[in-house]
Amino acid sequence: MADANALVEAMKRAARDEREASKPVSVCFGEVVSKAPLKINVEQKMILNESQLILSQNVTDYMTTVTVRWDTKAGILSSDEVTTAQPPHFHEIIGQKNFLIHNALEVGDQVILIRQQEGQRFVVIDRIGGNR
């Protein structure tokens, strides 16, 4: 009887594994519960740690280069000018400039994840709208 039960369980496992293998991806939702180290609670079922997560650029701090053409505004003093009491100066800011985009995940952020097929690694795609 024990052999029959083991066989039935093995068949159930094989059928379940086959169903999962036929799914190209699995979309999940989670909430950031820790920033350092990063931990995400997925659908209130399991906590994922950094080693299980692949972060898209949408959920990280990153540098980017932008092309700008700005004029400083008349009558507005920078913080340096205010503290040194120098008269304001006016000039253009033109060209390509590097900017740091502050987009890292914060505790409480709701996120969309995709689970790798047959794996325990998850790609964090983005926040769910309205988180920032």
Image (cartoon, grey):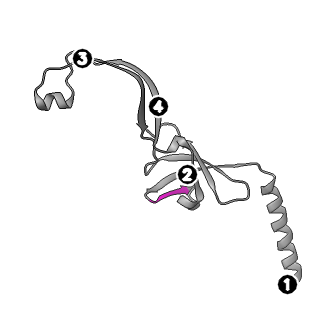
Select label 3 or label 1 by which is in front: 3
Earlier-in-chain disc, 1 versus 2? 1
Tag shown at residue 30: 2
Disc number placed over residue 65 in the picture, else none: 4
- Badge 1, how many Cα within 10 Å: few under 14, some, many 20+? few
Q: Residue at x 35, y 18 (%)?
A: 70
* Residue type, mark 4 in image: Thr
The Cα–Cα distance between marks 4 and 1, rounded to whole angstroms, is: 66 Å
Farthest bottom residue? 1
Q: Residue furthest top?
A: 74
SS type, badge 2: strand
Local packing at callout 3 (Cα closer than 10 Å; few below 14, some 14-19, many 20+) is few
Label 3 vs 4, first from the N-terminus: 4
The stretch in magenta equals 37-41
> Which quarter of the rendering shows the N terminus?
bottom right
The majority secondary structure of the magenta stretch comes to strand
**Sequence order check, earlier mark of 2 and 4:** 2
Q: Which residue is mark 1?
A: 2
On-image quarter of the C terminus: top left
Element assignment for label 3: loop
**Residue 9 position within the rendered picture, expressed as x and y whole percent measured from the top left:** 82, 73
The amino acid type, in three-letter code, at marker 1 is: Ala
